[in-house]
Image (spheres, rainbow, N blue to C red):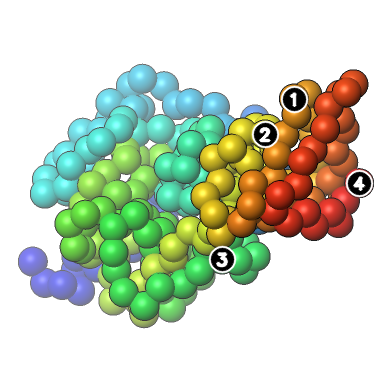
Amino acid sequence: MNSNILNKKCFILFLFLTFCALSELVADLPTTIYTPQGSIVPDTYLLDEMSQSDIAYFNQWVATHYPQATRLADASRTYNCHAYAWYVSEGGSRVWIGAETYTAEDVYWQDNSYVEQSTEMNGLKVSYRPDYQANHSAVTTSSAGIFISKWGPLPLMRHAYNYCPYWNDGITYLKYYKRNNVYGVPADFSTIAGALSAAPTGWSVVVAPVTQTVTNNSTVPSGVTLLIKPGATILFGSSVSLTVNGTLNAQGT
């Protein structure tokens, strides 16, 4: 097939996916999630699931049009590519990031939660950056050039980097991002104690601008930094203490 025809087909499909995602937002709810560095991820929603017949239809559509890609999970409109790559694959719940904008996921590297890498390696986040106002996110695998990504409301797929609805002549580059040495509360852990106990030497634990209650004695280990962001409030239970063997940077209260 002529590459231009294929590219047009992919672009039309992309518009179709976007329309499917946005056309039903009226009944859906905005929600708040945070990056590991404690920034709010904008334009994020909780979406209702589509019908079983629609799920089956989209599963079959992808199987027919992209037979060389592997379906890892059924079609779903409860999460999209950005949500899977930056949040769900890190243990977060299903949300839809970027329901009304094309730049919502940019906060993950703009606040230094992730840092750009020059080459592909296993476990990186990928940003597809085309020359029009739309984009895509994926996760690299141990096989070079093979990514995992969610295709709008379509299934979660394992595929070659250029074998998906978002690839066409408009793609100007792929950018790769590695997780910075930071655990976020509540992005990665629901409690400060849990994050501190898991943080390796050289890492930081960042508390987002939320209220956290510490109910057990906790320790900031040597070589670990606890950063309390502006707007965060830490409440300590009766007779509960925080021992600082590492570094405490309290910008909140």
Residue 34 in sight here: no
What residue is shown with label 4?
Answer: 253
Tag nearer the camera, 2 or 4: 2
Answer above or below: position of 29 versus 17.
Answer: above
**Cα separation between marks 2 and 4:** 17 Å
Disc nearer the start of the sequence (1/4): 1
Disc nearer the start of the sequence (2/1): 2
The answer to whether the residues at label 2 and label 1 have Cβ atoms under 8 Å apart is yes
Disc nearer the start of the sequence (2/4): 2
Q: What residue appears at the point 31 percent right and 38 percent down from the top-left corner?
A: 155
**Cα separation between marks 1 and 4:** 18 Å
**Cα separation between marks 2 and 1:** 8 Å
Q: Quadrant of residue 117?
A: bottom left
Instruction: Name the image quarter holding the N terminus.
Output: bottom left
Q: Residues within 10 Å of mark 4 (few under 14, many from 20)?
A: few
Residue 157 in sight here: yes
**Cα separation between marks 2 and 3:** 26 Å
Tag nearer the camera, 2 or 3: 2
**Residue positioned most to the left:** 1
Secondary structure state at the residue bearing disc 3: helix
What residue is shown with label 3?
Answer: 109
Secondary structure state at the residue bearing disc 1: loop
What residue is shown with label 2?
Answer: 193
The answer to whether the residues at label 2 and label 3 have Cβ atoms under 8 Å apart is no
Amino acid found under the numbered disc labelled 1: Asn
Left or right: 100, with 130 as reference point = right
Frontmost residue, 8 versus 67 = 67
Amino acid found under the numbered disc labelled 3: Trp
